Amino acid sequence: MSDFDVQDNTANHRFELLVDGAVAGLAMYRRRDEHTVVVTHSEVKPEFRGQGLGNELASRTLELIRSRGEKIVPICPFFARYVEEHSEYDDIVVR
């Protein structure tokens, strides 16, 4: 069983999905203001694809954003579709 974690790499403006300590996926962002994160692009590295890690990246990133009391603007098509399909995040999505 793999160990998953998401960290905010503020220096590179991206959330990173770590799988057993290796960066498997990322979600690039910019800040609209101090309380709003705009996710512009996401990807899972080729060697990690086909394992549902895009969903892990999205859910864990959204939970991290929520835990910090922030909102998200999902410009990235994958994140936009994910939040549309997961109404439990409606409280943090800026539409």
Image (cartoon, rainbow, N blue to C red):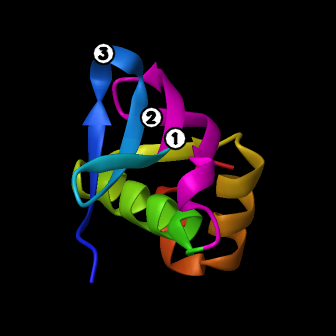
Residue 40, percent from left and from top: 64, 33
SS under mark 3: helix
The answer to whether residue 69 of the structure is visible from this angle is: no
The answer to whether mark 3 and mark 1 are in CB contact below 8 A is no
Tag on residue 78? none
The answer to whether mark 2 and mark 1 are in CB contact below 8 A is no
Q: Which residue is mark 1?
A: 27
The nearer-to-camera label among 3 and 2 is 3
Amino acid type at mark 2: Thr
Res 36 → quadrant = top left
Pick whichever of labels 2 and 1 is earlier in the sequence.
1
Taking depth in this image into account, of 84 and 15 the one nearest to the observer is 15
The answer to whether residue 23 of the structure is visible from this angle is: yes
Position above or below: 21 against 91: above
Q: Which residue is mark 3?
A: 11
Residues rendered magenta in the picture: 26-50
Q: Is residue 44 left or right of residue 6?
A: right
SS under mark 2: strand
How many other residues sit within 10 Å of disc 3, few (<14), some (14-19) or many (≥20)? few
Amino acid type at mark 1: Ala
Q: Is residue 16 left or right of residue 54?
A: left
SS under mark 1: strand
The answer to whether mark 3 and mark 2 are in CB contact below 8 A is no
Q: Main secondary structure of the magenta part?
A: strand
Distance from disc 3 to disc 1, alpha carbons, whole Å, reads 13 Å
Pick whichever of labels 3 and 1 is earlier in the sequence.
3
